[in-house]
Image (cartoon, rainbow, N blue to C red):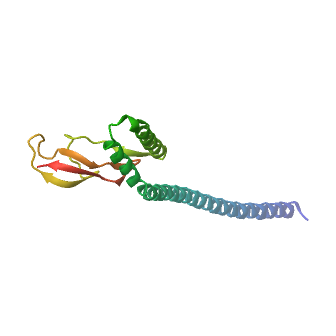
Amino acid sequence: MTEQDKQNNENQEHGDLFDEVSGIQSELDAALAKADEYLDSLQRERASFANYKRRIELDNAVLADRLLGEHIKIFLPVMDDLERALDHAPNEPDCANWIAGIELIRKKLLTTLDAQHVTEIKLKPGDMFDPTNQEAVTHEESDQFSDGEIIEVVRTGYQLKDRIIRPALVRVSK
């Protein structure tokens, strides 16, 4: 083999190696592009799943609060009865212990409700009527109160966190 043939063989081998390396580089570039595509898709799916999980947790919390509110509504008439009993308590000295016991029961029930984030809607005569958390039983003429002011709270309203579970019943001046 001549020197020229050796040189041609080497050039041919180098060319074949160069073609092979170019082919491998093209395959590597395609594989890296595919890997980037898969990584992007995976990151999108993870973000989508995290959003889904947050949404489900929020929906479950709202449902739990709604169900808690429905269960608490059952006990609100008991609170009303305790308040009526205290409003009409006899002034006899013999009844002092009985009245203190009823007040203690009412306070315990309020503490229990407060632990569940249930609060009374605090209203008093002279406050403005607000239909978002109050229900008007009557609209009456009044010399003492301006138009739209509460004359009397007939039944206490309650809310769970920021959601009304029972509106207050009020008499309103017109």
Q: Can you name the residue that lies furthest to the right here?
A: 1
Q: Residue at x 39, y 39 (%)?
A: 95
Could you say where residue 44 lies in the image, as x and y percent from the top left?
55, 59
Where residue 86 sits, quadrant-wise, is top left
User: Is there any visible trace of residue 13 in the rendered image?
Assistant: yes
Could you say where residue 23 lies in the image, as x and y percent from the top left?
71, 64
Q: Quadrant of the N terminus?
A: bottom right
Could you say where residue 131 lies in the image, as x and y percent from the top left?
24, 52
Report the front residue among 78 and 102.
Answer: 102
* Residue 171 vertical position relative to residue 12 in the rendered view, above or below: above
Report the front residue among 106 and 46.
Answer: 106
User: Is there any visible trace of residue 162 in the rendered image?
Assistant: no
Q: Residue at x 46, y 58 (%)?
A: 71
Could you say where residue 121 lies in the image, as x and y percent from the top left?
33, 45
* Residue 38 vertical position relative to residue 151 in the rendered view, above or below: below
* Residue 111 vertical position relative to residue 43 in the rendered view, above or below: above
Where residue 36 sits, quadrant-wise, is bottom right
